[in-house]
Image (cartoon, rainbow, N blue to C red):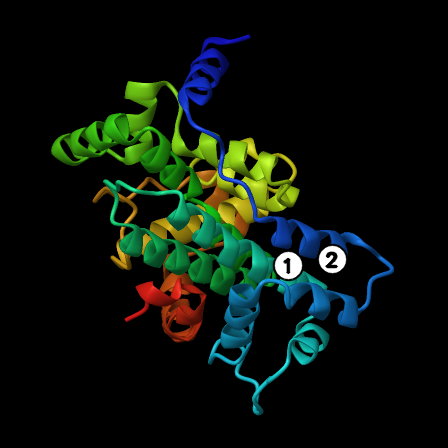
Amino acid sequence: MDNQTKKFNDLVQRMKDLPSLPATVVAILKVLDNPRSTARDLSEALHHDQSLAARILRIVNSAYYGFPREIDTLSKAVTILGYTSIRNLILVTKTFDVMRAGSKERSLNWKQLWRHALACGVAAQTMAIRLRTGLGEEVLLAGLLHDIGKVILDTHLHQEYSEIIRQARERELLLVEAEKEMLGVTHADFGRWLADAWNLPHNLTEAITHHHDPTQSKTFFVCASLVHMGDILARALELGGGGDDQIPAIDPQAWSALGLTPALLADLLEDFEERYDKAQAFLPEEDVG
């Protein structure tokens, strides 16, 4: 066992129980994983979690999807969106809910953190579409969840993380740099831990783990690179906040592999701004406004 793994395991042992997905959500995900299930089976399962059902209908009727008529039932939402989109909506909405429910003290401004995450996801998705990568909604979801490790640290190692945040701000460090220096591991490591525990799709896990070092993702390099660039763009545009005031350096391999140029980034800003405005429905309801 290397030193970094030992430090990580030691920190995990000091934490309280890892937040878990509610039983109703686990049941819904089982329906989604069953190749023989129908839209009716899924809509019936969703009815067992009324708050989730309401959130799905709110999002599907938002400007983000832009359907010309109101989608007034879950069965219609499932039929129109399909299983993959429904799964993505469930993962992001319930991740926000579970994390908020488990927190008492906060050193991070979570409202700003969610807005940063949304901007990262929308930026990554906008680039993915413009660059014709074949990726789309899954990149949005990866961006929305990329900093989930910060929430775990703020919740479960609150006092130490408060000091890490203070040091990062005073010394003008990225949080990931201060975490590495003071804990020996980073929020990306804890994000991977949660993603593995919740059995998130591998592309999401890789993007969460490697959004600061995308070249380390061998299987999902493009997805990780898009989230890496989305994080940087969101910070440069000062949309929300990641807990520090710094902008990470662009990974040159990610920049080159995606085929990005300064002119292309400037050109897609208008598209990004429109998508970001429409995607506000993904934010926790009490954090909108």
Question: Helix, strand or loop at disc 2?
Answer: helix
Residue shown at 81% from the left, 68% from the top: 38
- Given contact means CB atoms under 8 Å apart, are the residues at marks 2 and 1 in contact? yes
Residue shown at 46% from the left, 31% from the top: 190
Q: Is residue 62 left or right of residue 116?
A: right
Q: Is residue 191 left or right of residue 112?
A: right
Task: Work out whether residue 23 or residue 259 is closer to the camera in this orientation and state it.
Answer: 23
Residue 47: x and y in percent read: 64, 68
Of the numbered discs in the image, which one, if any, rests on residue 219? Answer: none
Q: Residues within 10 Å of mark 1 (few under 14, many from 20)?
A: some
Amino acid bearing label 2: Leu
Which quadrant is the N terminus positioned in? Answer: top right
Spot the residue most to the left. 170
Residue shown at 36% from the left, 38% from the top: 150
In this rendering, the answer to whether 54 lies above or below 103 is below
Task: Work out whether residue 127 or residue 173 is closer to the camera in this orientation and state it.
Answer: 173
Question: Helix, strand or loop at disc 1?
Answer: helix
Q: Is residue 69 left or right of residue 78?
A: left
Task: Work out whether residue 272 or residue 84 is closer to the camera in this orientation and state it.
Answer: 84
Q: Which residue is mark 1?
A: 87
Q: Is residue 136 visible?
A: no
Amino acid bearing label 1: Arg
In this rendering, the answer to whether 169 lies above or below 228 is above
Residue 57: x and y in percent read: 55, 75
Q: Residues within 10 Å of mark 2 (few under 14, many from 20)?
A: many
Q: Which residue is mark 2?
A: 32
Q: Quadrant of residue 217?
A: top right
Q: Is residue 16 left or right of residue 170?
A: right
